[in-house]
Image (cartoon, rainbow, N blue to C red):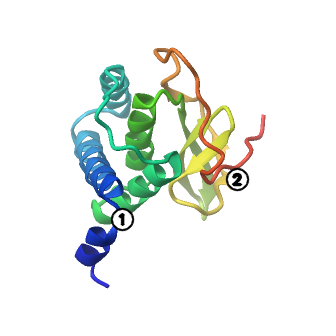
Amino acid sequence: MSRLSEFCSLPRNLRLQLLRSLSVVGFVRVGLLVVKVSTLSRALNKAARWQESLHPAVRTKDLLWTIRASGRVVPGALCLPQCLAAQFLLAQRGIATEVRIGVVRRDRQLAAHAWLESCEGSVCFDPGDQGRYTALQPMGRTSDHLTTSRPLAEETHTRSTRK
């Protein structure tokens, strides 16, 4: 089945969310090429304050799926662009998250990975051995401006975090 026929077979609300996620992931990917991560993160957090009432009604699990699917289509949209895009879209739903970046030494080189954390666990956009990464200081918390700190739904793929 081609990508276009797969897309057309999705329910309308999921197609709309996929298009929205694709545009946000693409915007974030281009944004990371032109500005620093911290600048882009702050701008996205400010923009997320204006909650959209017209976002498609999809489950959190499906929203995260659309981010992952968009990451497979947008060149270079690995874990960090997906995390920033998801944080933005989740913040518009009132779900507080925090971008975490971790590092690990592999063959005398440092490798980095980004993931989202919420009060219930973490969401990884490039599944693998996330547990091997040593987390650096948190960046880009959205809970500062949210009136409620709703947890990610249990329907998402979450993993307990170590404290």
Residue sitting at x 30%, y 24%: 47
Reading the image, the residue beneath label 2 is 131
Front in this rendered view, residue 152 or 124: 152
Q: Is residue 77 above or below residue 20?
A: below
Residue depth check, mark 2 versus mark 1: number of the one nearer the observer: 1
Residue sitting at x 35%, y 26%: 48
Compute the Cα span from label 2 to label 1.
23 Å
Q: Which numbered disc covers residue 130?
A: none
Front in this rendered view, residue 36 or 140: 140
Q: Amino acid at mark 1?
A: Arg
Q: Is residue 13 above or below residue 89?
A: below
Looking at the picture, how far across and down is residue 20, in whole percent? Answer: 27, 47
Q: Is residue 84 above or below residue 144?
A: below
User: How many neighbours does mark 1 have within 10 angstroms: few (below 14), some (14-19), or many (20 or more)?
Assistant: few
Residue sitting at x 29%, y 69%: 7
User: How many neighbours does mark 2 have within 10 angstroms: few (below 14), some (14-19), or many (20 or more)?
Assistant: few
Front in this rendered view, residue 145 or 80: 145
User: Horizontal placement of 54 versus 129: left or right?
Assistant: left
Looking at the picture, how far across and down is residue 86, in whole percent? Answer: 43, 42
- Residue 153 location, quadrant: top right
Q: Is residue 74 above or below residue 97?
A: below
User: Horizontal placement of 33 versus 69: left or right?
Assistant: left
Looking at the picture, how far across and down is residue 158, in whole percent? Answer: 65, 49
Q: Secondary structure at mark 1?
A: helix
Q: Quadrant of the C terminus?
A: top right
Residue sitting at x 39%, y 34%: 88
Reading the image, the residue beneath label 1 is 72
Q: Amino acid at mark 2?
A: Gly
